[in-house]
Amino acid sequence: MPELASHETCLGCHACEAVCPTRSITFQGDGFFTYPHIDIDTCIQCGKCEKACTSVRGGYEKELDDVSQTFYCAYNSDGEERAKATSGGTGGALAKQALSKGWMVCGAAFDEGLRVKHILSDKEDILDKIRGSKYVQSDVTGVYEQVREAVKGDRQVLFFGTPCQCQALVASLPMAQRASVLTCAIICHGANSPKVWEDYVRHEEQKVGKKLVGYNFRSKDKGWGAYRSALTFQNGTTIRRPAWNDVFMTWFAHDYDTQEACFHCPYRIEKRVADLTIGDFWGVEKLFSDVPTRQGLSVLIASTDKGKDFVKDVPQLVLTEVDAVLVVKKALKGYVEQRTEEKRQAIIQRRKTFEEEYAQHGYDFMAAKYPAQTYWGRVVHHLRFRLRQLGIG
Ligand SMILES: Cc1cc2nc3c(=O)[nH]c(=O)nc-3n(C[C@H](O)[C@H](O)[C@H](O)COP(=O)(O)OP(=O)(O)OC[C@H]3O[C@@H](n4cnc5c(N)ncnc54)[C@H](O)[C@@H]3O)c2cc1C
């Protein structure tokens, strides 16, 4: 039988599923994530799934070309769009430009049940649907196939996704069609469990007694760096809270429900896998002292000639080229993996324990055992921290 990635090594990119000529691979499981399974009755042992899987192949570096990367500080000149986006609204400006050229755009959106799924469209309303980070693993089932069909019919596609999803899409396309796709990866340090997210949504709906119709993982009502979430219910009420007061965001911060393989992500290196990469330009003030950051700034990295050509001419994008070495050395903490192996193993162990307990007891028990901080808890936490800094206690 072909070798597929294990629970420990599967990034959840669905490349194996996308390349299977007999549709013998499906993602299954009722835990935090789903994993690939082969139907042995229909598998023809062609080995395409093994070749497409970065984890099984043990890396991807050799496939990257040698074009030097260009780094930009970027933001969307439309203030409203930028305010609604997660960092500088760069993703939105790129998507708008693609639509205006007659391309299709593919990115992660909420469905009516607030599940996160990739969608493909050439309609203007995709811009609102895909805007904003959803810190949950997006379901890409079937979407690479849709892109493949679109490019076969001579369409061009701008694809947004995590680096592993960008690579999976490219791997699933015949060589001749790869030029029709421009990939834009988000800087990603790991995706959270769709199962935990669904349970969280249900719990919040029960608390308020209304359907949750919108969720902003990074509301900018107090600025870009404030880390606040905003929950919008069917009756129009919006609850905004700091991330430390939100159970889902607290677990995210502790990596309790991150996909295990993300701790050893092969794409979290300086040389980026996609044509373009966008992320939060954390640390930008270390490079420019007077830069206005309240509404968010993106780092934009163009890693291929195709990517460089595309960003040259995006009307809504304000770009300042920045020195790559300075960016990586002085700013952008977390852009490449910096934690030691020992530290990562400790987090993985803690996360495993969390998943086992969760499987046994369910969401409500875990929310009580691993709660978000209350306001008073936060005050005490800060006081303890200050006292420790002063060498007292
Ligand atoms: C799981 C996750 C982890 C991240 N970790 C980091 C990090 O460690 N450091 C950092 O600098 N930035 C990180 N980001 C990216 C960052 O939050 C912003 O999404 C990015 O800077 C783009 O913001 P924007 O304002 O330019 O565009 P926006 O308009 O906010 O566009 C966001 C784009 O991201 C895509 N997207 C949203 N959610 C997902 C998802 N779940 N899976 C795949 N694609 C998605 C959408 O399709 C959209 O095109 C992460 C994002 C996600 C989803």
Image (cartoon, rainbow, N blue to C red):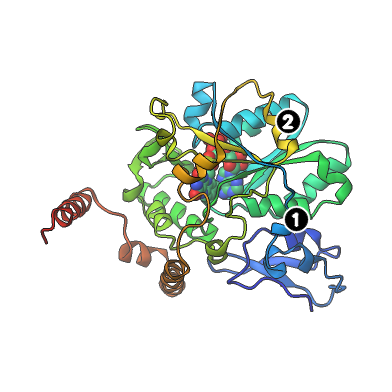
**Residue 326 x/y as whole percent:** 50, 40
- First along the sequence among labels 1 and 2: 1
- Name the residue rendered at 73%, 58% in the picture: 62
Look at the image and tell me in which quarter the N terminus lies. bottom right
The amino acid beneath tag 1 is: Glu
**Residue 327 x/y as whole percent:** 50, 40
Res. 63 mark: 1
Image quadrant, ligand 1: top right
291 versus 172 height, above or below? above
Count neighbours of disc 2 (C-alpha within 10 A) and say few if under 14, some if 14 to 19, many if 20 or more.
few
Read off the residue under disc 2.
309
Mark 1, ligand 1, within 8 Å: the answer is: no
The one of 54 and 27 positioned closer to us in this rendering:
54
281 versus 260 height, above or below? above
Image quarter for residue 171? bottom right
Look at the image and tell me in which quarter the C terminus lies. bottom left
- Name the residue rendered at 69%, 58% in the picture: 61
For numbered disc 2, what is the local secondary structure? helix
The amino acid beneath tag 2 is: Asp
